[in-house]
Image (cartoon, grey):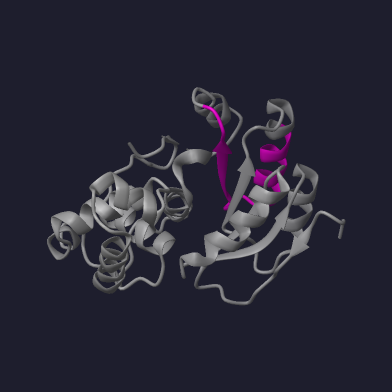
Amino acid sequence: MGPNETLMIGADTRRVRVALQQNQPLFRTGLALLLPADPDIEVVGSVSTLEQLVSLCGRAQPAPDVALLDGESDLALLAATTGALRRAHPDLVLVALAAQRGTGRSLLDVGFNSVVERRAGVGTIIAAVLRAAGRATKATLPASGELPSLLSGRESEVLSLLSRGMTVRAIAGHLAISAKTVEHHKSRIFEKLQTHNQAHSVSVALRTGVLSVEHPTRTVVSSIH
């Protein structure tokens, strides 16, 4: 195992097992910590290079369900990597994170199942991973259309702003309310959606239709506006 590689192999096969590769150390570390905010996700390992990712996917037991790759790597190297991963792991779903608009089609052409913009926020990335893995809905979640009636208009507004990555202070200024009131709305959102943190709440809202973002199996997921 190299100095830039962390291996975290678990035994809970009920969760979507994600192998993570990102070039930037801080972003990679942040994702490895934030993705498991959704209880349906387990990060089995995080690495910095494409070569390390191929090795990680070969060692992890059980094998990962999804590989989340840095879409800013060289396209030729990405094509070689997706080809190697598909030969070794035919059921592995490949998701790319793109930093810039307009790169999605190129990434799909080199073998990715879906592409999500990095700036879309962790909630959208989580939802994209789960949808790519075939977890668009869960038996434990309310059916689409039920949740919107649970949230008040203001709670829905706060949740939408949270999904954009806005801080409590920024939301308070935007809505001309106090930060304490925003925190109260957050608590009510967590309670009503039966979630335990902000990323999980956004993920559930995306997966049940409270927040709307396009992510079919082979598509580019843009940020929420």
Is 93 magenta? The answer is yes
Residue at 57% across, 40% down: 96
* Residue 24: percent from left, percent from top: 70, 43
Q: Which stretch appears magenta?
A: 80-100
Q: Which residue is nearer to you in this view: 97 or 94? A: 97
Image quarter (top left, top right, bottom left or bottom right) of the C terminus:
top left
Image quarter (top left, top right, bottom left or bottom right) of the N terminus:
bottom right
Residue at 16% across, 57% down: 145
Give the farthest residue toward the bottom. Answer: 11
* Residue 121: percent from left, percent from top: 46, 47
* Residue 210: percent from left, percent from top: 24, 53
Q: Is residue 190 above or below residue 215?
A: below
Is 117 magenta? The answer is no
Q: Which residue is nearer to you in this view: 36 or 143? A: 36
Residue at 28% across, 49% down: 211
Q: Quadrant of residue 214?
A: top left
Q: Is residue 129 above or below residue 217?
A: below
Please say whether residue 88 is visible from this viewpoint.
yes
Q: Which residue is nearer to you in this view: 119 or 85? A: 119
* Residue 4: percent from left, percent from top: 81, 54
* 10 relative to 5 in the view: left or right: left
Q: Which residue is nearer to you in this view: 98 or 186? A: 186
Residue at 51% across, 69% down: 15
Give the farthest residue toward the left. Answer: 149
Q: How many marks?
A: 0
Please say whether residue 210 is visible from this viewpoint.
no
Q: Quadrant of residue 110?
A: top right
Give the farthest residue toward the right. Answer: 2
